[in-house]
Image (cartoon, helix red, strand yellow):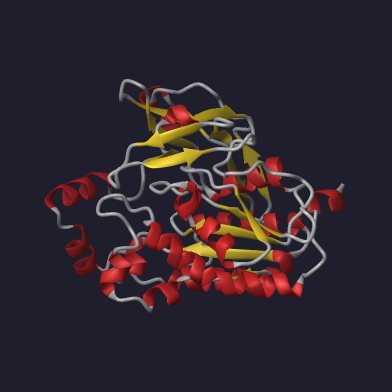
Amino acid sequence: MARQCFEYHPATAFRFVPGVRARIPHESGGYLLRANEQGFRCDRDFDAARHGSTRRVLVIGDSFTAGDGVSNGKRYSDVLEALLPDTETYNFGLPGSGTDQQYLAWREFARDIEHDVLVIAVLVENVRRIMSRYRRFQDAAGKPVVFAKPYFTVDAKDAISLHHSPPEPLPLAEEALPAEERAGVDRGGRFELLRSVVRRLGLQETVQKLTRYQPVTDYNSKSSPGWRLMRAILTQWVREHGDASRVVIMPIPLYQHVEGTSSARAYQARFAELCAEIGCTLHDPLPDLLRHSPAERRAFRFPIDIHPTPEGHAAIAKSLAPTIASLLERTAGSAMNPGARNR
């Protein structure tokens, strides 16, 4: 997505330019983007108070939630709203962000908003992204640059500490960073050079099946650095929210999990353990997605872009809707404003 659609923000590193409206070029033919005055892709501004008896669901995640590749109304948050009567959804998705930045976005923009349910949508790849200190982008001339991002570290007692807050607002040349800092640049995953060669040859799916490729190895162990940090961030987030019974953690699978080239067992186990420990609701959409045919599952992402198509968003919304409906029924008439409670 064009960086011109974003502006610097000291809490999260960036957000959408408030009020921006743009047509984004895409392999699908392009899609419409509209941001509200708070700087998020939503067709309405965010009001602190709930509107009468209308229930409200807050959804926070990265580009899979913000909706890269589709117009606002085609995203799973908007489809979810259409499936649930007398319910509105506020979408706080930030493309390119990690769960760390999403937690900071909730603290900065969402914690004082009255709501019934909070959905924390964790693209499972974020277990790697939260370990980074810088993200790569291209400037207006197409030259690669890096931007600093806020990040957390976790100590031996599972307490988290925030760094790069506020982050440096200006782009940096990667080669100018100290060697130890260059290791903190997010390069998009493991085996960068090998992946690019495999993609050019059109052998990606074949290689993944033959090698039993595991794109998110940090979930394999409870003590891996990435999972320890993810677990600590989510635990702090839910505790700070104040009512775990109103929080849903939804791990969003990668296309390798949906299409059967990688096993999801490790990340499913980690999130199940976490949610049981902290008392929030786990919604795993993968079993519902796997009920579709292989051809249908392949249509859940674009031919090149791995983000969900309208069909993919609709499938996620259909999976999530019963879980949200059950929580809304349980919490009927008692919307929560955790920020007001904690002040």
| Picture coordinates of residue 147, whole percent (x, y) | 47, 29
Residue at screen point 67% across, 69% down: 280
Q: Is residue 1 visible?
A: no
Residue 90: x and y, percent? 63, 51
Q: Is residue 204 above or below residue 9?
A: below
Q: Position of residue 20 (x, y in %)?
A: 52, 31
> In front here: 102 or 155?
102
Q: Nearer the viewer, residue 67 or 190?
A: 67
Q: Which residue corresponds to the image point at 64% horizontal and 66% vertical from the top-left? A: 85
Task: Count the marks.
Answer: 0
Q: Residue furthest left?
A: 201
Q: Nearer the viewer, residue 179 or 206?
A: 206
The N terminus: image quadrant: top left
**Picture quarter containing residue 212?**
bottom left
Q: In this rendering, does residue 37 appear at all?
A: yes
**Residue farthest bottom in this picture:** 291
Q: Is residue 210 left or right of residue 275?
A: left
Seen at 38% across and 56% down, the residue is 308
Q: Is residue 214 left or right of residue 132?
A: left
Vertical comparison of 266 with 90: above or below: below
**What x and y, as percent, mark residue 118?**
67, 59
In the rendered structure, the answer to whether residue 236 lies left or right of residue 249 reads right
Compared to residue 72, the image places residue 85 above or below, namely below
Which of the 4 quarters of the picture holds residue 55? bottom right
- In this rendering, position of residue 291 left or right of residue 229: left
Taking the spot 35% from the left edge, 59% from the top edge, the residue there is 215
